[in-house]
Image (cartoon, rainbow, N blue to C red):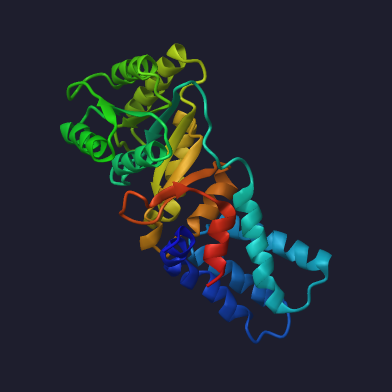
Amino acid sequence: MGFLNRLKESLAKTRQGLVEKIESLITGRQAIDENLYEELEEALIAADVGVETALELMETLRCQVRERKIRDPEQLKPLLQELVRNTLSAGENSLNRGGPPTVILVVGVNGVGKTTTIGKLAHYYKSRGERVLLAAADTFRAAAIDQLEIWGQRVGVDVIKHKEGADPAAVAYDALQAARARKMDMLIIDTAGRLHTKSNLMEELKKVRRVLGRELPGAPHEVLLVLDATTGQNAISQARLFGEATGVTGIVLTKLDGTAKGGVIIGIRQILDIPVKFIGIGEGVEDLRPFNPQEFVTALFER
């Protein structure tokens, strides 16, 4: 099965909660009136697009309807599809590169699948001929180091590690030196899962960033925040606070296959102005892919 079909399957719950709801509101309507706009707005909010984003989309929709002199409610679905595509396509969705090596710092709260995401990222780039090194800078839990090593063995990449309780910045420093010595294309650094409310842990992340930037100007080239799509609007709260503390440059949105809250991806782009770089649509090692806005919107709106 091609990736687009897999993506359509993964977005089935979100499509049912958003697109099919929009279709049901439009079908049989004779006119575009304020009641219809309000019902569409409610449908967007229910799909976890978010209140602020839903209001902005509806305001833009009203303007476009007036400018284009649209009378037929049936034309609202393709217009909404266009607006969502424009929102998601704003900015640069491809990975920032630098170095060598390109240094990627991966952050996020506990339980979002951060280490698994790193393993899949390593597989994605290694399968495309790049030399990848991993760094186990989550030193709070021995299990986190072990988990990353298991992923390293699974996808065939080395892992730089220290003992449990070591300074994460020291791990990052050693990993960067190793990546340079071995002429690696990419260094992906795991960090401890942390609540965005823990200021001391956020300070530690800032230290890791400083050490990397001192040793390699421009590093880290990406700070990727892993978010769980099933948490809906809470994902936006996490993104906002992590963004303020660590300078997040991109989002990895996981577990899109298990939720009706996939609309949160629109809110992330609209409210936070942080591009989604990768999406996860399943458990398999191949199920993490670069985010393609056109592909995503096609999979969401078309059956």
Residue 209 coordinates in the image, percent (x, y): 42, 21
Horizontal side of 66 relative to 299 (left or right) equals right
Q: Please tell me which residue lies in front, 43 or 23.
A: 23
Q: Is residue 148 left or right of residue 247?
A: left
Q: Is residue 240 above or below residue 161?
A: below
Identify the image quadrant of the N terminus: bottom left
Q: Is residue 207 visible?
A: yes
> Foreground residue, 204 or 106?
106
Image quadrant where residue 83 sits: bottom right
Residue 137 appearing in the image: no
Residue at 53% from the left image edge and 65% from the top image edge: 300
Residue 135 x/y as whole percent: 30, 27
The answer to whether 126 is drawn above or below residue 13 in the figure is: above
Residue 55 position, x and y percent, is 63, 59
| Residue 91 coordinates in the image, percent (x, y) | 62, 42
In this view, the residue in front, 143 or 238, is: 143
In the picture provided, is 5 more to the left or to the right than 62? left
Q: Quadrant of residue 35?
A: bottom right
At 57% from the left and 80% from the top, the residue drawn is 24
> Based on the displayed image, in which of its 4 quarters is residue 273 positioned?
top right
Q: Residue at x 23, y 27 (%)?
A: 139
Question: In this rendering, would 198 be left or right of 82?
Answer: left
